[in-house]
Amino acid sequence: MTTNTLIALVDASAYAESVCHHAAWIAGRTDWKVKVYHVMGRRDAVEKQDLSGAIRLGARSALLEQLTELDTARAKLAHEHGRAILEDAKAIITQGADITVETRLRQGDLVETVTAKEETGDMIVIGKRGEAAGLAMEHLGSNLERIVRASHKPVFIANRAFKPITSVLVAFDGGPSSLKAVDYIARSPMFAGLSVTLVFAGKETPAIQKSLSDAAATLKAGGFDAKTLVQSGEPEKVLAQITSTGAQDLLVMGAYGHSRVRSFIIGSTTTEMIRSCKVPVLIMR
């Protein structure tokens, strides 16, 4: 069941603005509303010193009371900060566009929140890195792979800088998820009018040729003049190389398959692929 709703996850990272711009782009093309979530981590308890011994009981009680007040003030400030993040996100998404935006402030585990709320949306947008990660290439959002694994909805992973999307590269292996991705592109207004290229990484065989031809036919029926490409090499290296040329604006790939693509999408090299890719990535289920 479709909900015509996009779930966008924002934090205080440099990627949050890109998440908002990509959410606006998706919502503008699909006429979806956007639910923006900011999830605060569970508040750590204030470390209370052992004030026994030389400090009188009255002094200890007074200090503990002050620490409690400070803890309360910090919690209030964190909520105000979270609300400010959501207000900024809404302003970015609605700027110059008629998009319905709802904001949600939650406290707890991000992945648990996504799992609980994903049925209210048709797609999830998240930044490549979170506020706890550095901007160096080796750092990725700690929750990213957990969300990709846990979610049953398409996950759109935004890179740091937003760029209008005009061309799409589809990682194709002939498996069920890549076929589903092709069908999704052919039917979704999100991709209408975009240039689409299907790429298979590996050895060309008659079976692969037929699968690519059938996929291109599906896209043609949806109004796309899709190109096909077969290139030898490891999928993660091939896809990273193609997307680094600047000719493609979005990489679409399935989360499961029946080839080497499966091992790197659901395995430990998932982050390697996302890290090396220079464009946003849409993971299909």
Image: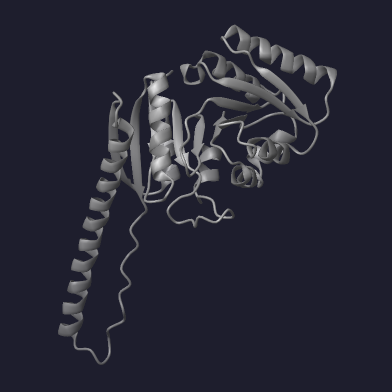
Residue 215 visible, this orientation: yes
Indicate the position of residue 133 as horizontal and vertical percent values. Answer: 48, 56
- Placement of 168 over or under 88, stated as above or below: above
In the displayed orientation, state which residue is furthest to the front: 246
The quarter holding residue 171 reads: top right
Indicate the position of residue 145 as horizontal and vertical percent values. Answer: 55, 44
Residue 117 visible, this orientation: no
| Color theme of the render | one colour
- Is residue 39 toward the left or the right of residue 58 in the image? right
Indicate the position of residue 77 as horizontal and vertical percent values. Answer: 23, 57
Indicate the position of residue 85 as horizontal and vertical percent values. Answer: 30, 46
Give the quadrant of the N terminus. Answer: top left
- Is residue 55 toward the left or the right of residue 7 in the image? left
Most foreground residue, 195 or 283: 195
- Placement of 259 over or under 60, stated as above or below: above
- Is residue 285 toward the left or the right of residue 235 in the image? left
Give the quadrant of the C terminus. Answer: top right
- Is residue 175 toward the left or the right of residue 156 in the image? right
Q: How many marks?
A: 0
The quarter holding residue 232 reads: top right
Q: Residue, x 42% and y 50% (percent of image)?
A: 14
In the displayed orientation, state which residue is furthest to the top: 221
Most foreground residue, 186 or 255: 186
Q: Residue, x 31% and y 81% (percent of image)?
A: 50
The quarter holding residue 21 reads: top left
Q: Residue, x 52% and y 13% (percent of image)?
A: 187
Q: Residue, x 49% and y 57% (percent of image)?
A: 134
